[in-house]
Amino acid sequence: MSISVFILFAGLFLSYSNGANDNFKGVATLFGSGASNYKRALYWATFTTFLGSLAALFFSKGLVAVFSGKGLVPNLSTEMPLFLFSLGLGSALTIYLATVTGFPISTTHALVGGLIGAGLAVGQNIQIEKLWNIYLLPLLFSPLISLILTRAFYPLFQSLREVCGINGQTCFCINGKEEIVEVTPGGAAILKSSGITLTIDQVSVCQTRYMGTLLGLRAQTVLDRVHYLSAGAVSFARGLNDAPKIAALMIGAKIFGINNAILWVGSLMVLGGLLNARKVAQTMSKKITPMNHGQGFTANLVSAILVTTASFFSLPVSTTHVTCGAIFGIGMVSQKADWRMIRNILISWLITLPVAGILSASILLLLKN
């Protein structure tokens, strides 16, 4: 059987794992803030991610060259079938393991780790300067920039809301209550107690809503629509940013041309998200910090701007790092962040690159020997 079949499998598995781990990240704030239920958010993420993948056919082909590995390792290595298979399978396994354990990690980090591990396994030197300038710097600074911008924008949006006379209100369910108790065999009863009860319900039922008007429309309606648009923009930007990175694997193996490769990658990303996104969705939406609609919108807006800008300039930023950084920023502003969960996510980020590198190197050495 041709090695190309195995490279194709690795590329499709990588695409599926990417969709399972990444597709929901753009809409995590919709689900987390109660603006949408899980299924509606997932379908919106799936649709807009696939649109982003299609747009990559026209706007993000520069990322194919970046993630071919050329310049990071000698060009001859990036054309070796074993190198490409080991890179794809090692990266895919890393992402899939994180997905089934519910940790949102970076496909970009996994690919970089795979490039390094497979490159070292074939006995080639890694170009450290290129590794730092083109790969690691954008990955390291993108979550920090996202966090800072979110912390800066949210107070500004709060002030703008107050200037426009839009107020946040939370409803509580209060009702009169009387309890009766039977006291005779004949069924006569007397009043046992009376008073007022306060009903506490799920967050999705009892949540902050915005009262007032904006541009002649109800403020809550405007916010919900813009929140959906910003979430769709993040998912679109993710498809735009990630599809060409993974397509580089199939193009390097000369299995597909660039257009067909991106279409296959986009399709498998959709499938992975539909079938295996729930655990990462719970982590991103519910376990980092509680958030209201305005906070979710702010995080999504910052994420969309950063990821879309990076895609057009062919900068390999991680959608995971950007979206998580924005949600971390919301948690810091609201002082409701779960720091234990944030610590665990940061640890998973730190080990992504070495785990992918070790897996890719091990696969290559095993097959080579």
Image (cartoon, rainbow, N blue to C red):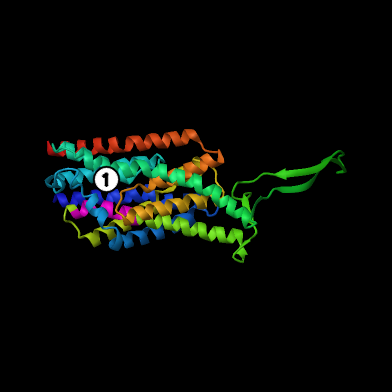
Which residues lie in the magenta part?
Answer: 240-251
Foreground pick, 95 / 77:
77
Image spot of residue 100 (x, y percent): 38, 41
- For mark 1, what is the residue? 134
Residue at screen point 33% across, 55% down: 311
Q: Say if 51 sits above or below 183 in the image.
A: below
Whether residue 343 can be seen here: yes
Residue at screen point 34% across, 47% down: 317
Most extreme residue toward the bottom is 216
Q: Say if 162 sits above or below 186 in the image.
A: below
Q: What residue type is labelled 1?
A: Ile
The rendered magenta stretch, by its main secondary structure, is classed as: helix
Q: How many callouts does the rendering have?
A: 1
Image spot of residue 159 (x, y percent): 59, 51
Image spot of residue 252 (x, y percent): 18, 52
Residue at screen point 17% across, 36% down: 120
Q: In which quarter of the image is residue 165?
A: bottom right
Image spot of residue 85 (x, y percent): 19, 46
The image quadrant where one finds the C terminus is top left
Foreground pick, 64 / 45:
64
Residue at screen point 45% across, 54% down: 42
